[in-house]
Amino acid sequence: MPDTQQAHAQLGTLSYVSPTPESPWGTYLAQVDRVLPYMGELARWSGTLRRPKRVLIVDVPIQLDSGEIAHFEGYRVQHSLSRGPGKGGVRYHPDVTLEEVMALSAWMTVKNAAVNLPFGGAKGGIRLDPKTLSMHELERVTRRYTSEIGIIIGPQRDIPAPDVNTNAQIMAWMMDTYSANVGATSTGVVTGKPVSLGGSLGRVKATGRGVFVTGREAMRRLKIPMEGARVAIQGFGNVGANAAELFVQAGAKIVAVQDHGGGLYNGHGLDAVALAAHVAQHGSVAGFPGGEVLGTEEFWTVETDVIIPAALEGQLTLARAERLRAKLVLEAANGPTTPAADDALAARGITVLPDVVCNSGGVIVSYFEWVQDFSSFFWSEEEINLRLDKIITGALNHIWATCDKYNFSLRTGAFVVACERILQARNERGLYP
């Protein structure tokens, strides 16, 4: 093999993406680079971290209510199946790209391994703006997309779940479509379904609850009192709103929020429940009467104890990290902090609790749902929450102990723990043929 081709293969460079350092896939690759020196002999398998196992791009044509035919581009990426079936959500967003879905699938691989769930990593998406489609059109696009990716999903193969702009209803349509196509009801093909169709109690609030539980543990370790703690949240959808409610119940106050519609500030604390109701009615925090208007960049300079990026990836940039006035960052979104921002925050002594642990509550309860579907035996919400707390707290404690032992950042520690599990599984399974 010529030297250039050999280098290309060793680096795991892909011909169909051109990542930049701060793009989602570029950010993920940089994170992997930082942990490979600690993998020892397992590092020989590092190419499996750098390359998705399977990439599917599908055309999703539907008939609109007007009678016109519209085409949307959809994706399903299975990054790794070494530790079990693929697991990861499906998002509907106008900015969805293949590279983004690849990165999200890779972070799912790491997340599932970091909390020791028996899953690999996968992710899906369709490039569309769901706000421009009627419910009937959303159903058609969901069913067509499910049929197109049906060749690679299944209860033992790859299990989709809700993500940005998708919900229990969309999961119900996906389950029904897959079941119709295989000729049998298959509740375990997706998670995040309505409870009446085999969904799990506690699933809707699980990601926000996981953010709160890991935040509570981190604050205890960092000696940040919960009572009166100032919290800022970017993104006030399902995850941000549920995390906010739990923090307020524990004695903290939400002093700043921001979403696509604007930002708000109230030094005495925003009413999290009333704000969530406002967002449900109006689609944004904009116009909520309980706070002062806050500019986009002003949000990142508010003095807080805890800041929670709960929107999209790449939001906490180097410039924002240099101005941040917080003690703790809880990554409720996937990949919200760029590598350069990570370094700047570390240099300033600001602790970052990485996404692969912080927002893992959703996939943990998805695992519970998957198990319950197979057994047709369902648990109470109290039992769900106790099991979630135990798994996510245990995972965080193990990662924190690893960081203390080797003087890692929490992100490096989480990736070291996760990647060792992933590569060990890959090594033990070997190559076929």
Image: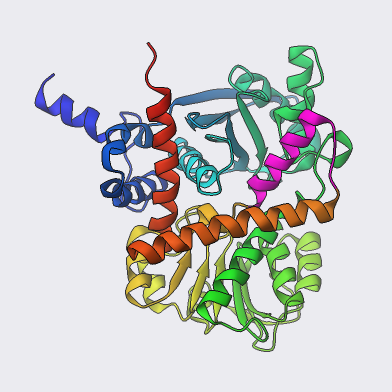
* Picture quarter with the C terminus: top left
Quadrant in the rendering for residue 66:
top right
Q: Is residue 90 magenta?
A: no
Residue at image location 35% in from the left, 78% down from the top: 348
- Residue 413 in the image: above or below residue 287: above
The image shows residue 77 at horizontal and vertical percentages of: 50, 31
Residue range highlighted in magenta? 361-379
Quadrant in the rendering for residue 283:
bottom right
Quadrant in the rendering for residue 347:
bottom left
Report whether residue 259 is seen: yes
* Picture quarter with the N terminus: top left
The image shows residue 377 at horizontal and vertical percentages of: 85, 35
- Residue 218 in the image: above or below residue 162: below
Residue at image location 56% in from the left, 82% down from the top: 224
- Residue 349 in the image: above or below residue 80: below
Main SS class of the magenta portion in the image: helix
The one nearer the camera, 59 or 310, is 310
Q: Residue furthest left?
A: 3
The image shows residue 187 at horizontal and vertical percentages of: 78, 28
Residue at image location 39% in from the left, 50% down from the top: 416
